[in-house]
């Protein structure tokens, strides 16, 4: 379980970061270290990433400029019904966001707004089943938007089955009633996606606030006839927060980001792609209670490995490796003036984890161990 920070007894670097409270919680009362890290990243991104955020805003604005209100409303139905970036079926709010100069938009608002729009484009491109109906564009205006935005984005998006093949927890979750001959089911409980809790706390978690959507904890703990933990159970054993599964949304949306910036020299290598996607998706998914830090990072890593290196298979990152990968990226994307303080905070976050074996893994932990 994530431990809360004692804000009255902090080292100097934590006091500096904790001064960045929100208007609703100016003193960061009862905030975990992860909460503070995500807020700091969104409020103080590295200035070197500002041109890429501005370009994303401009590119999306150009693509949507001539689209009808009906088509825009259909697009907004592609993602979550309660997106953190706003635009809940509000075309006027979308137009106002795109009409503004990005330099006049606060960084948190800009990041969350871009993430919401990128998700909408991505989900409409793959015709995601959890999007609002109709999944297929029906009117001429909807088809025009799909052909100009979603169809070309789809060429850059990896199939969801690719990540399910690497992370078998996802394969089981997607199959529902499918073949589970290789997996031993053990536990299935409803879990608030706003909670990071241990298995022993399941019953308490059922008393969840009404504004949290219910999610299902993975119902298996070890692969059948082995001592190898599933990804979800490995996270729990490693003391790493988990909400559900490795994020396929992160890998899907990374493809749309690369398409939108396909002419940008800034995305010429996987490290730059990782950094931009880390800024866009890790804090927004975390703060919207979609995915934890490690879950989102594993999805980003999947895209850059498979797309950048043309690999169709690789050994999955363990939850601990995913968290290490995420923290390294987050240190890179924060403002340089806060980087040394954020690095110390990230080290403290990683210290809470436990190394377990065995788990299929391929990336070292030397950075934070």
Image (cartoon, rainbow, N blue to C red):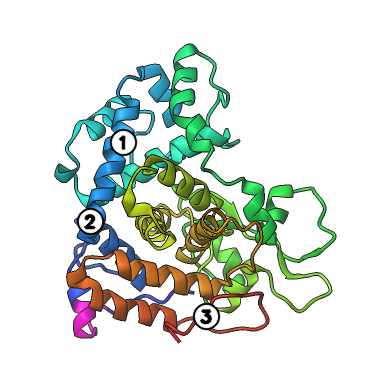
Near-viewer residue (210 or 297):
297
- Residue 63 picture location, percent across and down: 34, 28
Work out which quarter of the rendered image holds the C terminus and state it.
Answer: bottom left
**Quadrant location of residue 259?**
top left
Is residue 15 shown above or below 283? below
Identify residue for label 2.
24
Residue 89: within the magenta?
Answer: no
Which disc, if any, is residue 59? Answer: 1
Task: Sort mark 2 into few (<14), some (14-19) or many (20+) by Cα contacts within 10 Å.
Answer: few
Q: Residue at x 27, y 42 (%)?
A: 55
Residue 8: within the magenta?
Answer: yes
Q: Which residues are magenta?
A: 7-15
- Residue 175 picture location, percent across and down: 74, 48
Task: Sort mark 3 into few (<14), some (14-19) or many (20+) by Cα contacts within 10 Å.
Answer: few
Q: Residue at x 81, y 70 (%)?
A: 224
Identify residue for label 3.
364
> In terms of sequence position, does the residue under pointer 3 or pointer 1 come before the other?
1
Q: Secondary structure at mark 3?
A: loop
Is residue 349 shown above or below 141? below
């Amino acid at each position: 379980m994530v431990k809360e920070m004692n804000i009255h007894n902090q080292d100097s670097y934590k006091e500096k970061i904790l001064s960045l409270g929100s208007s609703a919680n100016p003193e960061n009362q009862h905030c975990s270290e992860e909460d503070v890290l995500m807020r700091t990243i969104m409020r103080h991104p590295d200035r070197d990433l500002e041109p890429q955020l501005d370009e994303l805003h401009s590119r999306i604005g150009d693509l949507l400029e001539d689209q009808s209100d009906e088509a825009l409303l259909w697009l907004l139905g592609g993602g979550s019904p309660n997106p953190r970036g706003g635009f809940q079926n509000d075309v006027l709010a979308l137009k106002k966001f795109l009409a503004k100069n990005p330099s006049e938009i606060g960084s948190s608002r800009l990041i969350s707004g871009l993430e919401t729009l990128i998700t909408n484009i991505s989900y409409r491109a793959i015709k995601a089943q959890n999007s609002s109906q109709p999944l297929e564009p029906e009117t001429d205006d909807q088809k025009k938007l799909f052909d100009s935005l979603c169809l070309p984005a789809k060429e850059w998006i990896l199939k969801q089955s690719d990540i399910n093949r690497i992370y078998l927890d996802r394969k089981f979750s997607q199959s529902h009633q499918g073949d589970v001959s290789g997996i031993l089911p053990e536990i299935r409980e409803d879990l608030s996606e706003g909670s990071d809790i241990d298995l022993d706390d399941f019953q308490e978690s059922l008393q969840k606030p009404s504004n949290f959507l219910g999610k299902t904890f993975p119902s298996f703990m070890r692969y059948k006839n082995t001592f190898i933990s599933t990804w979800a159970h490995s996270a729990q054993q490693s003391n790493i927060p988990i909400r559900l599964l490795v994020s396929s949304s992160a890998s899907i949306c990374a493809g749309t980001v690369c398409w939108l910036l396909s002419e940008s020299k800034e995305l010429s290598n996987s490290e730059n792609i990782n950094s931009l996607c880390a800024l866009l998706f890790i804090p927004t998914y975390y703060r919207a209670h979609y995915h934890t830090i490690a879950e989102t990072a594993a999805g980003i890593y999947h895209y850059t490995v498979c797309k950048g290196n043309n690999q169709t298979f690789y050994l999955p990152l363990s939850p601990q490796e995913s968290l290490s990968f995420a923290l390294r990226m987050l240190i890179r994307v924060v403002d340089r003036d806060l980087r040394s303080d954020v690095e110390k905070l990230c080290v403290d976050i990683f210290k809470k984890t436990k190394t377990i074996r065995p788990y299929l893994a391929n990336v070292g932990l030397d950075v934070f161990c």
